[in-house]
Image: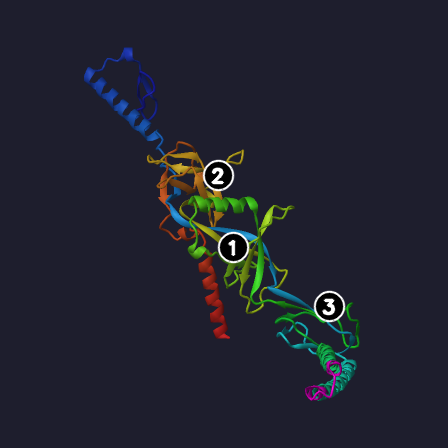
Amino acid sequence: MVCLRSELIVTSSRNPVRWPRAALTWPVSLTAGAVLVALSACNQKQQAAAPIPAPPPEVSVVTVAPQPIPYVRDLPGRVAPMRIAEVRSRVSGLVVKRLFEQGSQVKEGDILYKIDPAPYEVELASAEAALARQEAALVLANQQAERLETLLTRQTASQAQYDTAYAGRKQAEAEVAGAKATRDRARLNLSWTDVRAPISGRIGRALLTEGTLIESGTTGVLATIQQLDPIYVDITQSVGELNKLRRDLASGELSRLENDTANVHLIMDDGALYPLAGRLLFSDVTADPSTGQVTLRVQFPNPHDELFPGMYVRARIKQGIDSDAIAVPQQAIQRTNDGKSEVWVVKADDKVMLQPVEVGPVVGQNWLIRDGLKPGERVVVEGFQKISAGMQVKPLDLSPPADQAELKPRDADAEAEAAAQAAAQAGKNR
């Protein structure tokens, strides 16, 4: 029995019988009961066909909270030697011997080259002979002056004779002093035939070989010595960014580091972190007119010669601390067609809406939010494809799980300390 129109249809096994309402002659009670049965069957089928509402979609959220975040910048840099010296000869002569190993470590005062000393030995001997002759003349002049002084007291010699003897003695003394200077110069020239290292450091390749004739005053570079431990890294930063940093420190938006010292860490070309931290020495007072950047010089220990002059590195420098910063994971930031930043925010009634924000620099895996978010707001980080503005969602907090480690800013000091401990342990194992 089904309900189609205002008719009662009785279905039998063979032929259905249709009874129009006007032709019904059954008792009223029987007709009313049949109608009720038909309406009940219709209501049950309509209820079964009605759609069941879908549950709200699940989205992953993080709750915004202020936290101290260090202001860390990754800046390009070049490695430069702490000291560099060019080895040159002060005297002329023939190079007879090279006494260093190319690329080795040398100490200040080590003999690097030997120049033929024979001409300078002869010159020294001649100067010593001339000195002996002048010293003998001085002895004679002293005796003459003393004798005339005695005769003058006895009034057997004139004052003029004594004055002449006295002047002769002074002249002989001057001749002796000149002869000593000539001897010392000859001795100095002889010592310069041993070309010594002016500083301690690592010496490069030999630029001259044995048998080369060196001319005084026109000599070239014999070798180059560079001091590599400690070593400098010159990093560059734009003038505008540096001035903004100084203004933020002056206004209190950023807090200064302890003792005003900035620890700097290096990221090598293969992405590895250099295990030893550096110390910022100073920033240059002159900007490069072609690039608008200033140079910051950092000093690093280099005990194992891992850093080479001219090497390109990236320096991670901590320049301040934002004590109440707000940051969200990078995947939470959405971009509009005109490039502006916005985030999905879950309101108190669990409905989502897009909210524009002003982003700052990237710190680790997070975007620093300068404006647009308040503490306590919930920001969507996963499930964007399932939501639209005004939709009710089921938020799942991502703060407690393991993913939180990726949402925290990277601590360069902790990474460097861990790398140093790993390197020390590896050295013990070897």
Q: Residues within 10 Å of mark 1 (few under 14, many from 20)?
A: many
Tell me the distance, in whole angstroms, between the alpha carbons under discs 1 and 3. Answer: 37 Å
- Residue drawn at x 50%, y 64% as measured from the top left: 276
Instruction: Provide the residue designation for mark 1.
Output: 316
Which structural element holds mark 2?
strand
Mark 3 or mark 2: whose residue is earlier in sequence? 3
Picture disc at residue 334: 2
**Colour approach in the figure:** rainbow
Residue type beneath disc 3? Val
| 70 w.r.t. 46: above or below | below
Q: Residues within 10 Å of mark 2 (few under 14, many from 20)?
A: some
- Residue drawn at x 45%, y 63% as measured from the top left: 418
* Residue 371 in the figure: left or right of residue 126: left
* Residue 298 in the figure: left or right of residue 249: right
Q: Tell me the magenta residue range.
A: 148-163
- Residue drawn at x 64%, y 76% as measured from the top left: 109
What percent of the width, then of the height, locates residue 105? 62, 73
Foreground disc of the pair 1, 3: 3
- The furthest residue to the front: 155
Mark 2 or mark 1: whose residue is earlier in sequence? 1
Foreground disc of the pair 2, 1: 1
Residue 240 visible in the shown view: yes
Q: Residues within 10 Å of mark 3 (few under 14, many from 20)?
A: some
Mark 1 or mark 3: whose residue is earlier in sequence? 3
Magenta span has 379? no
- Which secondary structure type mostly characterizes the magenta part of the structure? helix
Residue type beneath disc 2? Gln
Which structural element holds mark 3?
loop
